[in-house]
C-alpha cells in the first residue's frame, strides 16, 4: 500500500553521482534533502596512468577526443573507497542514481552481459580488473568534446531530408558530438568493432549498468542528446536508426522514464561496501538534465538556469530552460524534462567559449586577477556606448563560427566594424555584455520567454557578483543562486529520492511535491535558492543589443558560407 504523502522518503539516505568530463563526484542527501556527505575523484591527478588531460585523450592523428571507459570504473571504486574511509553509512542508502556527461558512448563486447552479472567480490580482482580485458569492444569512448563527425552529420541530415527535419524529429539537428553520428563513424571506420558490440550505453546508463550488474536502459532525457530518439513519441526513431547504422535498435535496448527504478543494486556492492540488498538503482540521466531540473529545482515554465562552468565541469556555457511548448530548430537543443513524466521539456543552448574567453580577457587586461577584471567591468557604463566584442578562442558551436575576434560600434541603426582595440574596460564589458546578449537572443529564438520568470545561476563563476548582476540586467529579471555547487551530483541524489518515493507511493511523485513535503529549513536544503541580483533599469537597451548582436552573428555566418 502507498505510504502517507507526508512521509515520502522515510528515514534513509539517497546517493547521487556525477560522472563528468574531468571527475567523478558523489553527494548524499537525507530524508530532508540536506547534504550529509560528498566526495570527488579527479581523473588527471588521481588516475594518472590513463594519461588524460582534462579527463580526455586528444588523438591528434585521428582528430578525435575520447576517454578510456575503464577509467570511469576505476574511479568509481576509488570514490567508494574514499567514502568508506570516512565511514560513510552505506547501509542507510535506500536508493541511488547519477548523471553522466552527455553524448559519450560505451561499447560492450558480446558476452559482456554475463560478465556484469557474475561480478565477484570474493576473488582478488577488483571491479576494473574483472571488466578491463573482456567487457568492451573498444576502450575508447567518444565524448562530447569530439567534433570529428561532420561528414556523418551531413550524411544523416541528407538521409532525413535536411537539418530542419532532423531537429523537428529529434530535438536537435545533427551535431558532431551527438552519439548517433559517433556511432555511424564507428560503423564506417571500424566495422569489426561495431560487429563485436552487443550493447551501446551512454555514460549515464553505463555507470548505472555497473551498479545493476546488467544493462541499464537509457532514459528519455539523455537519449534526446543522441539524434536517435523521436522527441514527441519518446521512442527510437526508425528513420534515424536506419540513417545511422544497421542493427542499431537491438544494440541500444529499450528506453525508460528518468524517475523509474531500474532494479536493485548488485550483490558485489552489498558485500564489498555494505549497501543494503534492497537499495534501489534509479535510472541515471545526463549531467545537464540533472543539474537543470533536479539540482536547481527548475520546474516552472519560464525558469532559466545559466551555468558558468569551472575547471572541473563542462567548459560550455549552458543556458537551460523548462518549457511546455518546445520549438526545435537549427540551433540549440530540446530534451524531455527528467523530473516530469510527460508534460515539459528542457531547451538548452551551448557555448564553447564562455569561460575560455573571459579568462583570456582577465589574463590580458587584468593581470590574471578577477578583482581587477571586475573593476574594469564597472568602469564602462551599461551598454558600453555601443561597443561590442566578438571573441572566440576556439571554434564556436552557437553560432557556428571559427576562432577569431571582431569589434563593432553600434550607433542607432548603424553598425561599423573597428580594426583596433577598445580600451581595457570597454574590451571586458564588450565581451561579457555580448555573451549574455547572445544568450538572450538565442534563448528567445528557440521559444524561451523574455523576460524569464527568473534565472538560476550555477557553476564557479556564478559566485562573481559583477557577472550575475550584469546577467540580471541583460535578461531583465532576478537571478538566484543554488546553495549546492555540485548541482549535477546533488540533482542525481534528489532524483534518487524522487524515484524511491514514486516507487514507494506506486505513483509518480512530482519534484514540487517532494520538495514541499520533505525539504528542511531553507538554509539546510540542497535545493535552497537565494536571491543574488535584481535587474537594474536600462529601458529596452539590452533588448536592442540582443537583436543587434544576433543580426551581426547572421552576417558573419553568411560571410563565412560565401567564402
Image (cartoon, helix red, strand yellow):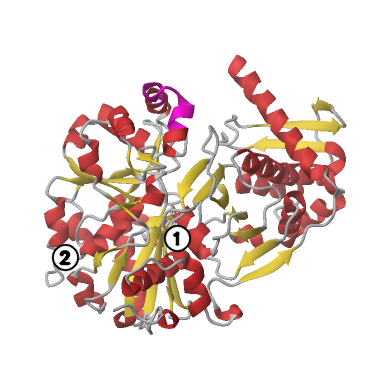
Q: Earlier in the sequence, mark 1 or mark 2?
A: 2
Q: Which residue is mark 1?
A: 339
**SS assignment at label 2:** loop
Residue 360 in sight in this render: yes
Residue sitting at x 38%, y 79%: 13
Magenta stretch: give its range: 157-167
Asked if disc 1 and disc 2 are in contact, CB closer than 8 Å, the reply is: no
Q: Nearer the viewer, residue 154 or 67?
A: 154
State the image coordinates of residue 200 (x, y, percent, origin top left): 26, 45
At 51% from the left and 64% from the top, the residue drawn is 295
**Left or right side of 228 for 195:** left
Task: Please name the residue shown 26% across and 56% down the image.
Answer: 216
Residue at the outermost top position: 563
Tell me if residue 301 is in the magenta stretch: no
Q: Residues within 10 Å of mark 1 (few under 14, many from 20)?
A: many
Q: Judge left or right: residue 293 versus residue 405.
A: left
Q: Is 165 contained in the magenta span?
A: yes
The answer to whether residue 418 is above or below residue 23 is above
Q: Quadrant of the C terminus?
A: top right
Q: Is residue 500 above or below residue 337?
A: below
Residue that carries the numbered disc 2 in the rendered image: 125
Amino acid at each position: 500500500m502507498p505510504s502517507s504523502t507526508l512521509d515520502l522518503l522515510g528515514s534513509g539516505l539517497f546517493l547521487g553521482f556525477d560522472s563528468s568530463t574531468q571527475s567523478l563526484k558523489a553527494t548524499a542527501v537525507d530524508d530532508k534533502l540536506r547534504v550529509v556527505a560528498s566526495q570527488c575523484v579527479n581523473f588527471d591527478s588521481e588516475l594518472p596512468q590513463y594519461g588524460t588531460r582534462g579527463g580526455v585523450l586528444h588523438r591528434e592523428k585521428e582528430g578525435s577526443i575520447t576517454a578510456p571507459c575503464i577509467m570511469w570504473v576505476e574511479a568509481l571504486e576509488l570514490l567508494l573507497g574514499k567514502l568508506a574511509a570516512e565511514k560513510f553509512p552505506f547501509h542507510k542508502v535506500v536508493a541511488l542514481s547519477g548523471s553522466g556527461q552527455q553524448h559519450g558512448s560505451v561499447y560492450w563486447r558480446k558476452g559482456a552481459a554475463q560478465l556484469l552479472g557474475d561480478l565477484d567480490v570474493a576473488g582478488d580482482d577488483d571491479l576494473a580488473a574483472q571488466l578491463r580485458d573482456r567487457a568492451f569492444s573498444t576502450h575508447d569512448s567518444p565524448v562530447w568534446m569530439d567534433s570529428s563527425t561532420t561528414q556523418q552529420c551531413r550524411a544523416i541530415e541528407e538521409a532525413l531530408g535536411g537539418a530542419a527535419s532532423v531537429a523537428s524529429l529529434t530535438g536537435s539537428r545533427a551535431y558532431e558530438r551527438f552519439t548517433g553520428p559517433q556511432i555511424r563513424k564507428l560503423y564506417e571506420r571500424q566495422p569489426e568493432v561495431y560487429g563485436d558490440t552487443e550493447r551501446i550505453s551512454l555514460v549515464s546508463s553505463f555507470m548505472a549498468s555497473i551498479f545493476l550488474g546488467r544493462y541499464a536502459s537509457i532514459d528519455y532525457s539523455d537519449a534526446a542528446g543522441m539524434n536517435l530518439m523521436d522527441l514527441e513519441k519518446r521512442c527510437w526513431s526508425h528513420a534515424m536508426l536506419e540513417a545511422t547504422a544497421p542493427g542499431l535498435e537491438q544494440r541500444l535496448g529499450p528506453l525508460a522514464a528518468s524517475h523509474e527504478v531500474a532494479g536493485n543494486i548488485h550483490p558485489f556492492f552489498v558485500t564489498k561496501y555494505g549497501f543494503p540488498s534492497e537499495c534501489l538503482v534509479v535510472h541515471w540521466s545526463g549531467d545537464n538534465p540533472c543539474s537543470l531540473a533536479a539540482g536547481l529545482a527548475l520546474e516552472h515554465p519560464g525558469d532559466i538556469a545559466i551555468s558558468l562552468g569551472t575547471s572541473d565541469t563542462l567548459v560550455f556555457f549552458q543556458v537551460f530552460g523548462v518549457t511546455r511548448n518546445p520549438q526545435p530548430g537549427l540551433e540549440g537543443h530540446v530534451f524531455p524534462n527528467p523530473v516530469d513524466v510527460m508534460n515539459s521539456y528542457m531547451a538548452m543552448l551551448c557555448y564553447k567559449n564562455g569561460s575560455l574567453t573571459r579568462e583570456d580577457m582577465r589574463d590580458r587586461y587584468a593581470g590574471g586577477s578577477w578583482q581587477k577584471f571586475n573593476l574594469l567591468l564597472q568602469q564602462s557604463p551599461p551598454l558600453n556606448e555601443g561597443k561590442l566584442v566578438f571573441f572566440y578562442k576556439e571554434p564556436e558551436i552557437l553560432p557556428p563560427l571559427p576562432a577569431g575576434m571582431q569589434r563593432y560600434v553600434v550607433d542607432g541603426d548603424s553598425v561599423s566594424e573597428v580594426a583596433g582595440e577598445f580600451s581595457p574596460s570597454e574590451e571586458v564589458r564588450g565581451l561579457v555584455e555580448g555573451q549574455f546578449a547572445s544568450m538572450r537572443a538565442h534563448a528567445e529564438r528557440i521559444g524561451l520567454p523574455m523576460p524569464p520568470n527568473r534565472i538560476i545561476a550555477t557553476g564557479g563563476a556564478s559566485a562573481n557578483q559583477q557577472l550575475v548582476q550584469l546577467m540580471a540586467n541583460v535578461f531583465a529579471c532576478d537571478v538566484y543562486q543554488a546553495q549546492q555547487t555540485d548541482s549535477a551530483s546533488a540533482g542525481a541524489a534528489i532524483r534518487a529520492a524522487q524515484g524511491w518515493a514514486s516507487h514507494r507511493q506506486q505513483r509518480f511523485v512530482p519534484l514540487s511535491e517532494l520538495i514541499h513535503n520533505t525539504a528542511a529549513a531553507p538554509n539546510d536544503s540542497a535545493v535552497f535558492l537565494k536571491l543574488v541580483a535584481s535587474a537594474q533599469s536600462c529601458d529596452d537597451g539590452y533588448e536592442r543589443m540582443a537583436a543587434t548582436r544576433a543580426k551581426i552573428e547572421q552576417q558573419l555566418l553568411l560571410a563565412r558560407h560565401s567564402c
